[in-house]
Image (cartoon, grey):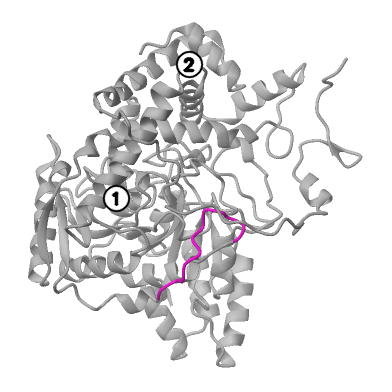
Amino acid sequence: MSDLTDLSIAGARDGLTRKDFTARELTQAYVAAAAAARPLNAFLVETPERALAAAKASDERIAKGKALPLDGIPLAIKDLFCTEGIETTAASKILKGFLPVYESTVTAKLWAHGANMLGKTNLDEFAMGSANVTSAYGNVESPWRRAGDNRPLVPGGSSGGSAAAVAARAAAGAIGTDTGGSIRQPASFCGIVGLKPTYGRCSRWGIVAFASSLDQAGPMTRSVRDAAIMLGAMSGHDPKDSTSADLAVPDFEKAIGQGIKGMRIGIPKEYRLDGMPAEIEALWQRGIDWIKAAGASIVEISLPMTQYALAAYYIIAPAEASSNLARYDGVRFGLRVKGGSLNEMYENTRASGFGPEVRRRILIGTYVLSAGYYDAYYLKAQQVRTLIARDFDKAFQACDAILTPTAPSAAFAIGEKMDDPIAMYLNDVFTVPVNLAGLPGISVPAGLSKDGLPLGLQIIGKAFDEANVLRVGQAIESAAQFTAKPAFIAGKT
Amino acid sequence: MALDKATVARIATLARIKLPEAECQALAGELSKIMDWIEQLNAVKTDGVPPMASVAHMSLPMREDKVTDGGERDKILQNAPQAENGFFAVPKVIE
């Protein structure tokens, strides 16, 4: 039965419809796979009973001919989504033991569509990181290894547990969140598909907040079609999130497979960084050739503000984080460390509850928002953000979607780039501008590095044009024929 | 922009994070490096550019001024480190 875990979500759906296997058999296979994947530390909590109970309900609906679109599909949930009665920690000590009394809108929608939960996945603490090495509950290991080198690699971050679980066949799909690249970069590192929808497409209600003007939930899957299926289930207006868009949700699955003949794909010249590895450059060129061969035209575009995006991001995101994380004060939930006074209690709780990267970002955020510095930093960054969004608006007058690499490198070893925060921040150089402009972007596995590690290409679309992002993504997917598998497959190694 | 030890101690107080003095020194170095890197934004001309207020190009929705939720005291207190008589309990604030 372990071959069940090699099926895509679409493949599993078809098998369930044909009654080749039951939701219970499929879920049982994934429950075993999630347990077998423990060496990766991808899951913080496994919820097998809950998954199997939901699968039983799915089987009953399927038997009655009343199957829901995601019936029987076992998913891994980034531990940033509040799940009722299931510990939700954001990979922080400060939330240890927190049992939400409510369910996030996005997860509630997935369960309402018939999916079941295998468990909660590890991440960088409060989603702050690009390598999943800031979790209070240990690093996640990528299931991939460099050829001839057994050193553990990072899965990327912050949705590293979700990416590792999907790549290792320990979940049929997963959800992550993306504030500056946290879905797309780990998807690229782990050889899977990761989609960050337009800001406002999915409700943020019930997601532990990092930077509210940038955060978006999205699917992480093994195919573009699977991403389309999951996005359809996750999207839609939610009155509980006033920034969620009151727009109809298109049939994303229908949009793919139409081909890209006649589309105009933009190539931003500013994304050719000095010192970018030749293999990333070559991968991008292959992507351009595939686009041309599929009948679309290539347009050179200019996004001149690209080089300033990371610096603006590292003002805006920490500023919003310092405000959002003020709620962790030892009073209403989570950790409390005693002190002589109320103030001392706050200070002790936050000193021992937050890890070094989270503290660093709260301090930067507090500094840039403090009296006398607001205009010089925060206001300036928000002006630069306007210019970045204008760059994209202008570019989209000449093209329908944009093709770039997802990350400037393949995955690196655990321990590398750890002592220089700025080197770590550079991982997100191609993904951050998309969040600043609120646009949708997808990473699709497109090739291997010389060391045998996955590399992704990113497609960026117009606001609320996920349909075309998926369409171009599928064109890249079918041209790339990415069939490589990681060294670690749950239950097979 | 170099941050000195005293500035780090001041922002740590504002952020309500206790920092031992030795850590203030190390953090001053680290944060200064990050702030120096951020200074590159000064090269961007932003005169007359409006700061972005909303990326979604949407106006905030209005709804009827009506209570739609509530009465969940016990649920809300369920995760409190210390709750007494239906309230969150904290160290004494008023002597």
Looking at the rendered structure, which numbered label has been put on residue A335? none
What residue is at 38 percent from the left and 52 percent from the top?
A: A183
Q: Secondary structure at mark 1?
A: helix
Is B63 inside the magenta-drawn segment? no
Q: Amino acid at mark 1?
A: Phe
* Vertical order, B1 against A195 (above or below): above
Q: Classify residue A49 by image quadrant.
A: bottom right
- Horizontal side of B19 relative to A461 (left or right) equals right
Q: Which residue is mark 2?
A: A372
* Vertical order, B61 against A31 (above or below): above
In the picture as drawn, the residue positioned furthest to the front comes out as B48
Q: Amino acid at mark 2?
A: Gly
Task: From the image, give the main secondary structure of the stretch colored magenta.
Answer: loop
Residue A21 in view, yes or no = yes
Q: Residue A448 or B7: which is nearer the viewer? A: B7
Q: Earlier in the sequence, mark 2 or mark 1?
A: 1
Q: Label 2 vs label 1: CA separation?
A: 41 Å
- Horizontal side of A70 relative to A197 (left or right) equals right
Report crowding for label 2: few under 14, some 14 to 19, many 20 or more residues within 10 A (C-alpha).
Answer: few
Q: Secondary structure at mark 2?
A: loop
Q: Which residue is mark 1?
A: A189
Please provide percent x and percent y for residue A281.
11, 47
Is A240 inside the magenta-drawn segment? yes
Please provide percent x and percent y for residue A129.
41, 38
* Vertical order, A103 against A310 (above or below): below
What residue is at 24 percent from the left and 59 percent from the top?
A: A445
- Horizontal side of A114 relative to B29 (left or right) equals right
In magenta, the rendered stretch is: A239-250
